[in-house]
Image: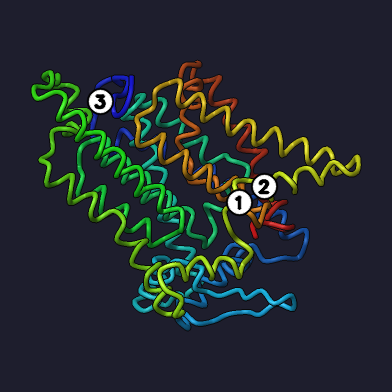
Amino acid sequence: MTDLETPVAPAREGPWPRRVAPALLGYAAVRALGLVALALWSATRDKSPHQLLTARWDSLWYTRVAELGYGYEVRLPNGDVHSNLAFFPLLPWLERAVSAVTPLSYADAGLLISTLASLAAAWGIFAVADHVYGRRAGVCAVLLWAVLPVGIVQSMAYSESMFTALAAWSLYAVLTGRWLTAGLLASFAGLTRPVGAAVVAAVWVAAIASYGRDSSAQDPPAQDSSVRERSGPAPDSAPLWRRALGMLLAPLGAAGYVLWVGQHTGKGPLGYLDVQAGWGNGFDGGYAFARFVADKFTSLPSALAGLGLIIGVALVIWLYVICVRQAQPLPLLVYAGIVTALALCASSYFGSKPRLLLPAFPLLLPLALALARLRTSRSAWVLGSVAVVSAAYGAFWLNGSGPP
């Protein structure tokens, strides 16, 4: 199978709310477990779990944008300039809007938005996995995303949950031939994080591939009615103008913000790259990360951490290879590949890489499919055990170094 062809999943049974309910309830239970673990761990260290979730690292930068707008920066002793222009505007816009109509502070508004967005992301991941592999795999995919070691970030006032929600639903729209929706959601994703380029690329590649099939097959085989009911409109059945308009909409968010930053800084279209350079961020093909890992092998204790990093990177690459071998739909492969490449090949903030990989949920689909083939009791035992470990690790991590 290639391009947008997918294994035919079982026909849907029941309406969407009932179908997705086990995934959302399971997701909420895992996140609640993580928050309980965080509260207990924080109590032993005399820290506020609320502050850990709303007022550290990126969450502070987002609330400053919501409160003061753009233009705030910090000059470090080494000459680097940390500007809040590095943070894309959709989350602080929403924080300001929610705070304006509720008694919530900007920080608490961000926490509420992130909580709702995480549920939307879980539903979107379920929708994609259900479309490709069926309901059981969809539930397992959502729970796997919930029990990731850095899953506590999904409960923070960060933009990862909102970005994942927009990306997942944009990809689902592509898979089901809703090109205008796909383009609009991709545009919003581009206003959320720099990696929104991955969603734009997925929409564009899928649309271009559909044009190619149009020219090579004027009379596509009829689609079974049960599959149409399960999947919605076929991706290639939409009029050309809808696909073209979806492609046009997709990059507007990211391009608009990047161009505005260039105009605001007076440095032209590449001004945003200068802003990122002030943070020490860049794309070097993974050279700096490789040196960071190699430096871990200078002593025995740190060598174990270096070995763990190598195993982690190898696991991510192996999962992507399995995704390709299992012939995942083309937009999922493009999206996951770009998110993974940008996360692993960035030249700074190496401790952030697990967090930056959170949106790459298609990498979890091979594991979800394997769990779905087990007996329910066995898969529940596996996921439950991992959830406990993840909750403990998340509480320890956030009370320590946490996500920079």
Residue closer to the observer: 258 or 170:
258
Instruction: Give neighbour class at mark 1: few <14, some 14-19, many 20+ (Cα, 10 Å).
Output: some
Q: Residue furthest right?
A: 299
Q: Classify the position of the C terminus by image quarter.
A: bottom right
Q: Amino acid at mark 2?
A: Tyr
Mark 1 vs 3: CB contact within 8 A? no
Mark 2 surroundings: few (<14), some (14-19) or many (≥20) residues within 10 A = some
Amino acid type indicated by mark 1 = Asp
Secondary structure category for the residue under label 3? loop
Q: CA distance from mark 3 to mark 2?
A: 49 Å
Residue 247 in the image: state x and y as whole percent: 24, 49
Q: Residues within 10 Å of mark 3 (few under 14, many from 20)?
A: few
Please identify the quarter of the rendering in which residue 61 is found.
Answer: bottom right
Q: Residue at coordinates 62% horizontally, 30% vertically from top-left?
A: 315
What residue is shown with label 1? 284
Q: Label 3 is placed on what type of residue?
A: Glu
Compared to residue 15, the image places residue 162 above or below, namely: below
User: Relative to residue 218, is residue 404 drawn left or right?
Assistant: right
Q: Position of residue 30 (x, y in %)?
A: 54, 42
Q: CA distance from mark 1 to mark 3?
A: 48 Å
Mark before the other along the chain sequence, 1 or 3: 3
- N-terminal of the two: label 3 or label 2? 3
Coordinates of residue 229 in the picture (x, y in percent): 17, 28
The circle drawn on residue 287 is: 2
The circle on residue 13 is: 3
Residue 215 appearing in the image: yes
